[in-house]
Image (cartoon, rainbow, N blue to C red):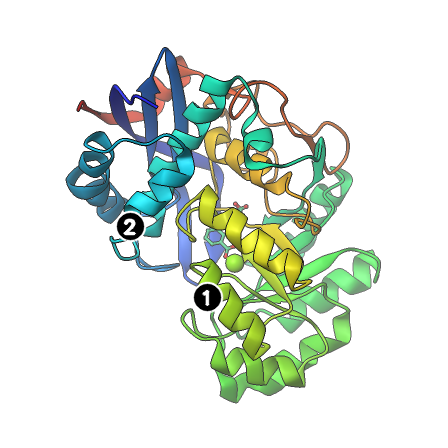
Amino acid sequence: MNIERIELQHLQMPYLTPFEASFGRMDGRRFVLVSVYGEGAVGHAESVAMEGPYYIEETNETVSYMLRAYLIPLLLRSQVNRPEDVSALFEPIRRHNMAKAALEGAVWDLYAKQKGVSLAAALGGRKEEIEVGVSIGIEPTVDEVLEKVERFLEEGYKKIKVKIKPGFDLQPIEAIRKRFGDEVPLMADANSAYRMDQMDRLKELDHFQLMMIEQPLAHDDIVDHAQLQKQLRTPICLDESIHSAEDARKAIELGSCRIINIKIGRVGGLTESRKIHDLCEERQIPVWCGGMFESGVGRAHNIAVTSLPNFTLPGDTSASNRYWQEDIVSPEVKLARPGILQVPAGPGIGYELDQRRVDKFLIKKEIFRP
Ligand code: OSB
Ligand code: MG
């Protein structure tokens, strides 16, 4: 593919409003935007690591370091013909999945642009539009959760996900059901906030017809989740516990979940995401695409992967205006109809990077050549 230059741009973008999960509260996002140049084209992707190691172990600094010290030098001295080669090239390096995914994603975009096809088509996706939902953080009060649910239902989002933690779980869920009814497609995400001795609390959630409960137990567990799933009617969806297709296979075989959340960053890239998708399709486990507060660049990658057929549940890829005053892509990611995003047909990710806007949030730029 003849890679001539790689750029890292370090950005700091403020959120419209702060977001809280069981692992912490955030009011903006610092992240690395990766651009790979070759044969007159450029591919972009972003790292989805956060400031601190509280969702998973990677951070912005570990991603920057791994890209600079290992992944970029390795890519620049290797011959790659297809983006799948990048995934294979990175295999000897253990974990650091978000760092790998950021670089591999940019190569996927570059590849699709060089071929003149959409990233979705390059991956084998066929959907022209996708259904999307929205993730709501832990709010100071239940009333504030209800206000957000109301607003997002008005915007037509196809799934409402609320963050829960012990002490802020049954109240918001019960209030949402009471106010908006049983038909609202509703789920809860615990981000590993519960232990097995709190099983009774989790069992009470069974009364609310939730689509699923996401990652109730430890971030690295699939054994206790299997025990818990036996005691729950509500499907468990795993997020933090799944880093690869092998992890997914083991979780499915143990019965640890009935649904899997695929995040491109968490699993090390688009190639691995597609592998998990294919495995789950074969095992009849529905998947959906999780979110990491991405800018438009990451959103575009999420949209492309969601065009694969077994992404049958609405994901967390909401529109740009969910988090941003102004996004760094043009056009911004907007709902085509209530709760629906169009899969772009143009080359690559199908959104232009707006460098003028990037410059507004730019902290530092690094350039690498073979
Ligand atoms: O657990 O799904 C999660 C954001 C950061 C880290 C983990 C998670 C999330 C979200 C937000 O739920 C999803 C989004 O709107 O991007
Ligand atoms: Mg989650």
Q: How many marks?
A: 2
The residue beneath circle 2 is 59
Q: Quadrant of the N terminus?
A: top left
Q: Which sits in the foreground, 275 or 28?
A: 275
Please report the residue visible at 52 percent of the width from the left and 72 percent of the height from the top. Answer: 251
Q: Residues within 10 Å of mark 1 (few under 14, many from 20)?
A: some
The residue beneath circle 1 is 247
Asked where in the image residue 105 lies, by quadrant, the reply is: top left
Q: Residues within 10 Å of mark 2 (few under 14, many from 20)?
A: many
Q: What is the spatial separation of the Cα atoms under label 1 and label 2, in whole angstroms?
A: 22 Å
Q: Indicate the amino acid at tag 2.
A: Thr
Please report the residue visible at 40 percent of the width from the left and 48 percent of the height from the top. Answer: 26
Q: Which sits in the foreground, 308 or 138?
A: 308
Where residue 365 sits: x, y (%)? Answer: 22, 24
Asked where in the image residue 152 lies, by quadrant, the reply is: top right
Please report the residue visible at 26 percent of the width from the left and 25 percent of the height from the top. Answer: 6
Q: Secondary structure at mark 1?
A: helix
Q: Quadrant of the C terminus?
A: top left
Where residue 347 sits: x, y (%)? Answer: 54, 19
> In terms of sequence position, does the residue under pointer 1 or pointer 2 come before the other?
2
Please indicate whether residue 205 sits to the left or right of residue 55 in the image.
right
**For the residues bearing labels 1 and 2, Cβ distance under 8 angstroms:** no
